[in-house]
Every structure is written in structure tokens, then in C-alpha cells.
Image: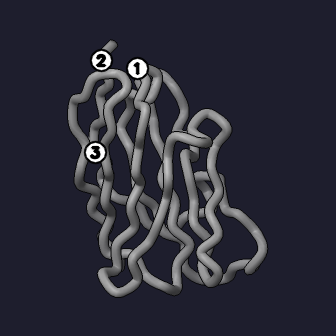
């Protein structure tokens, strides 16, 4: 059983930055960051492929967020710059282990086996 833990959430003003961390990740896992705002469905923010480490970003965060992984530290990061009030949500880290397609980006909630409890990110205007 994998127990993921997210850290780094908080309250910031629009235009500021935050970096979220998630551990433990694994070189044998696809890792993803999702978020869920009140009254909305959980949505993918970014994902990083097992193997080549290629990233995927939702259109809403392209150019502002960066996902990365440090395999030596078993940690995945989400660097969030130029934050906007609409980025306010609970952010979840997720891991997919098991069968995978090397060239595929897993972006659905149902694609992931393991989840962290979430960390709140609030962006004030």
C-alpha cells in the first residue's frame, strides 16, 4: 500500500508562487497532480510519465505550472507560478502503478491507484 502525502499548500496572493511536494513517488509510477474546487469535479492539472518523465499539462495551467520528479528523493513537485484566484482548490497527488502504455499520458481520475489526502491552495485577488 502506498500512502502519498502532499505538502506545500497555503494562502497566497494572485501572481505569487507555491511549490507542492508529494512523497513517496516511484520511478515505477506515473505521477499526477489533480485539483478539486468546491462544487466541481476533480480535474487533472499535470502528469509526468513513467520512464521518459515527459510532462502533461492542462490548458489552464500551461506556461505557469511545472511538474517534475526527483527519483533520488522519491518526490514529485508541482511548481505553481503566476497563481490566479481560479487556481484555488484542494490539490491531490496521485500515483499509477501496474500496467501502462509508455507513450500515453494518464489524465483521468480513474487511471490512478493511489491518492494523497490533498493540500489546500487558496489564491486571493
Q: Eyeballing the image, is 80 above or below 49?
A: above
The CA distance from mark 3 to mark 1 is 16 Å
Q: Give the quarter of the image for residue 104.
A: bottom right
What residue sits right under mark 1 in the picture?
A: 85
Q: Eyeballing the image, is 72 above or below 40?
A: below
The CA distance from mark 2 to mark 3 is 16 Å
As drawn, the label of residue 119 is 3
Q: Is residue 103 toward the left or the right of residue 91 in the image?
A: right
- Do callouts 2 and 3 mark residues in contact (Cβ within 8 Å)? no
Nearest to N terminus: mark 2 or mark 3: 3
Label 3 secondary element: strand
Rendered location of residue 13, percent (x, y): 28, 22
Nearest to N terminus: mark 2 or mark 1: 1
Rendered location of residue 51, percent (x, y): 62, 84
Rendered location of residue 29, percent (x, y): 52, 78
Q: Give the quarter of the image for residue 105.
A: bottom right
Nearer the observer, 97 or 56: 56
Label 2 secondary element: strand
Tell me which residue sits at (34%, 80%) in the image.
74
Tell me which residue sits at (41%, 54%) in the image.
78
- Do callouts 2 and 1 mark residues in contact (Cβ within 8 Å)? yes
Label 1 secondary element: helix
Nearer the observer, 101 or 76: 76
Judge depth for marks 2 and 3 and give the one in front: 2
Tell me which residue sits at (29%, 17%) in the image.
124
Amino acid at each position: 500500500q502506498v500512502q502519498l502525502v502532499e505538502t506545500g499548500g497555503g494562502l497566497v496572493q494572485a501572481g505569487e508562487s507555491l511549490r507542492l511536494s508529494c512523497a513517496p513517488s516511484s520511478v515505477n509510477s506515473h505521477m499526477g497532480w489533480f485539483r478539486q474546487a468546491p462544487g466541481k469535479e476533480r480535474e487533472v492539472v499535470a502528469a509526468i510519465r513513467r520512464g521518459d518523465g515527459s510532462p502533461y499539462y492542462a490548458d489552464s495551467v500551461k506556461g505557469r505550472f511545472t511538474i517534475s520528479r526527483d527519483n533520488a528523493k522519491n518526490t514529485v513537485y508541482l511548481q505553481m507560478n503566476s497563481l490566479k484566484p481560479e487556481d484555488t482548490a484542494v490539490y491531490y497527488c496521485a500515483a499509477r502503478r501496474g500496467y501502462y502504455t509508455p507513450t500515453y499520458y494518464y489524465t483521468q481520475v480513474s487511471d490512478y491507484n493511489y491518492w494523497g489526502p490533498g493540500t489546500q491552495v487558496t489564491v486571493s485577488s
